[in-house]
Amino acid sequence: MGLNAFFTYTVVFALGYKWQQALALVFICGLINITITVTKVRKMIIMAIPEVMQHAIGGGIGVFVAYIGLKNAGFLQFTSDSSNILSVNNAAYSATKAVKGVTGVVTGGGIVPALVNFTSPGALLALFGLILMTILVVKKVPGAVLIGIIVTTLVGIPMGVTDLSVSSANSLGSSFAALGTTFGAAFSHQGWAACSPMVSRS
């Protein structure tokens, strides 16, 4: 999850690379990882990191993944005072001007996180799934997480949370059809070829 976030928000959004270029860079990193893994370099790097820091890295990644889970489950809501809002939809924000179709908000601070009122079906279903998985894991049931996902998905059908609709753009067939484009994107003129001048300059 941390690498996915770095890929999306840092490499693509912040640094301005295209996703095809980012995939090419991921391929290069993969080659480097393979090289240090088959040699003793990887072990040397791990041994050079203090054990306390190794545990801290694992804990930090766990907290990050937990935060994303809580946010996507709809457990959290964020409130920003209007005086701290800098722009809405890349335009200067004015409290007296109505904004329609908000796609992005930039604020200078003052964001207050809080738990939502558990009245929405999505939040209630997520809470049910979290409790169910916790009980199954504590009971050491084999496949606890997978069972929890399946049961929560089935319970979500009568609640109207689980979306069973299938569109042509989001079908299994279209996913397989896009594999060639996705895997070849890193080596296309928008991927590897676009990265080559930057790599040679660096």
Image: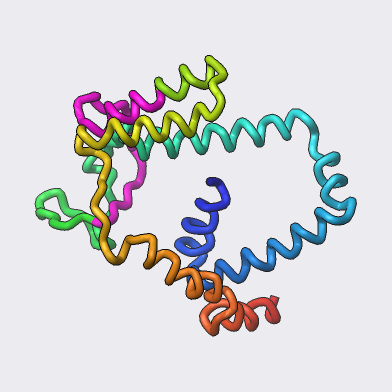
How many numbered marks are there?
A: 0
Most foreground residue, 159 or 64: 159
Magenta run includes residue 116 = yes
**Which color scheme is applied?**
rainbow
> Which corner quadrant of the image does residue 24 belong to?
bottom right
Which residue is rendered at x = 28% and y = 44% of the image? 84
Left or right of 74: which side holds 43? right
> Which corner quadrant of the image does residue 62 belong to?
top right
Magenta run includes residue 157 = no
Left or right of 195: which side holds 166? left
Which residue is rendered at x = 24% and y = 37% of the image? 157
Q: Is residue 26 above or below residue 137?
A: below
Most foreground residue, 114 or 163: 163
Q: Is residue 151 above or below residue 90?
A: above
Q: Is residue 141 above or below residue 17?
A: above
Q: Which residue lies most toward the right here?
A: 40
Residue 46 placed where, x, y %? Answer: 81, 42
Which residues are drawn in magenta? 103-130
Residue 170 can be seen in this image: yes
Residue 113 can be seen in this image: no
Which residue is rendered at x = 33% and y = 36% of the image? 153
Left or right of 159: which side holds 185? right
Residue 186 placed where, x, y %? Answer: 57, 74
Which residue is rendered at x = 45% and y = 24% of the image? 133
Q: Is residue 148 above or below residue 24?
A: above
Q: In the picture, which quadrant includes the C terminus? A: bottom right
Left or right of 114: which side holds 194? right
Residue 33 placed where, x, y %? Answer: 75, 57
